[in-house]
Image (tube, grey):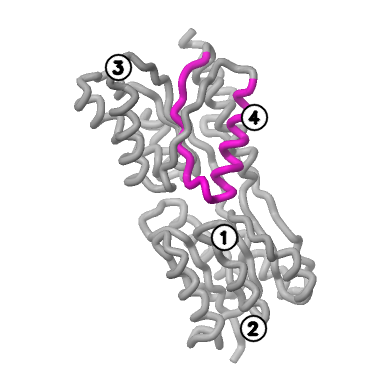
Amino acid sequence: MDKNTLAIFLPHDETNKYQQLMMEDARKAARKAGFEVDAFFSGGQVVTQVRQIYNCIRGEAFDRTLAVIAMPVTDNSLNRVASDAVRAGLGWICLHRQMDCLEELRKQYPSLPISAIGPDQLEIGRIQGRQFRLLLPGGGRVLYVQGNATTSSARSRSQGVTDSIAGSRVEIDLLDGNWSAEDAERTVGGWLKMVMSGKARLDLIGCQNDDMAVGASAALKSVAAYLRKPELENVPVTGCNGLPSFGQRLVNEGKMAATIIMPSSAAAGVDLIAAARQGKPVPPSVLLSATSYPDEAALERVARTRR
């Protein structure tokens, strides 16, 4: 049987807007290249994701699967699975996460498409840090909600923020929001109740994705009522991912101060596999560029009007 299916494994569930975009973009790119796509969501569970992938390596899906495109739940959680996949003759494209095994696998299986693709996470953090400085030209306190400290993407973004605010009067409090609106609302709400019950100051909440920004906004609203501090509802919130129908829309509606447009890596993964099928070389890694929304010049103009 001619293998023509790409199996795409995403770490969250179908309600995650960015993961929806990744799946849709992968399907569009696959249709253009003549591939079929099987898409799977693991609900944040490593065990579920491992089981799903092994069905393509050893189960009924093996006969039709050409390659795996996976965004692991956590860094290096799929190293052994990736080794088994390429040993079975499947290509392997990792999205957004760190996998220490890929360099060695490329050496062992040079005929297979093996690569890592993702946005420049450090630069995303630097963009966020510059947004904070532009939105708070006189400095201030920022609650920074990272996705999950166990992932390299969250750590790199946090490092980028630290780089950008160095030498400024912007101060950061770090909190984990686990990439989801629900978890961000819970953790931000708890932090606000504990910290803001007195005379503490909060000038901005920055989040590593737009879903968490929505959760943080909900927490601000509920805690404002709980503490009888209506001014909390006016604390600006920023995010990242910047989908036109979600993050950019929230900025345009005035519900977020800024976001970052992050390209979908899944379509780029499909393109690499298509190129490999045509005999073209596959690079060990691909970094995708992100941009501020609104752009940084526009944010600076807004900041000037507030001075």
Amino acid identity at mark 4: Asp
> Which of the 4 image quarters holds residue 3?
bottom right
Tell me the element at label 4. helix
- Which class describes the residues within 10 Å of circle 4: few (<14), some (14-19), or many (20+)? some
Tell me the element at label 3. loop
Amino acid identity at mark 1: Ala
Q: CA distance from mark 2 to mark 3?
A: 60 Å
Between marks 4 and 1 in the image, the one whose residue lies nearer the viewer: 4
> Pointer 2: what residue?
88
Tell me which label, 2 or 3, sits earlier in the chain.
2
Percent of width and height locating residue 275: 72, 68
- Which class describes the residues within 10 Å of circle 2: few (<14), some (14-19), or many (20+)? few
Q: Is residue 159 magenta?
A: yes
Percent of width and height locating residue 40: 45, 69
Tell me which label, 2 or 4, sits earlier in the chain.
2
- Which class describes the residues within 10 Å of circle 1: few (<14), some (14-19), or many (20+)? many
The quarter in which the N terminus is drawn is: bottom right
Q: CA distance from mark 2 to mark 4?
A: 43 Å
**In the rendering, which numbered label is found on residue 198?**
3
Left or right: 91, with 15 as reference point: right
Tell me which label, 1 or 2, sits earlier in the chain.
2
Residue drawn where x is 41% and y is 43% of the image: 177
Which range of residues does the magenta coloring cover? 139-166
Answer above or below: position of 230 versus 290: above
> Pointer 1: what residue?
266
Tell me which label, 3 or 1, sits earlier in the chain.
3
Amino acid identity at mark 2: Ala
Q: Is residue 267 magenta?
A: no
Between marks 3 and 1 in the image, the one whose residue lies nearer the viewer: 3
Tell me which label, 4 or 1, sits earlier in the chain.
4
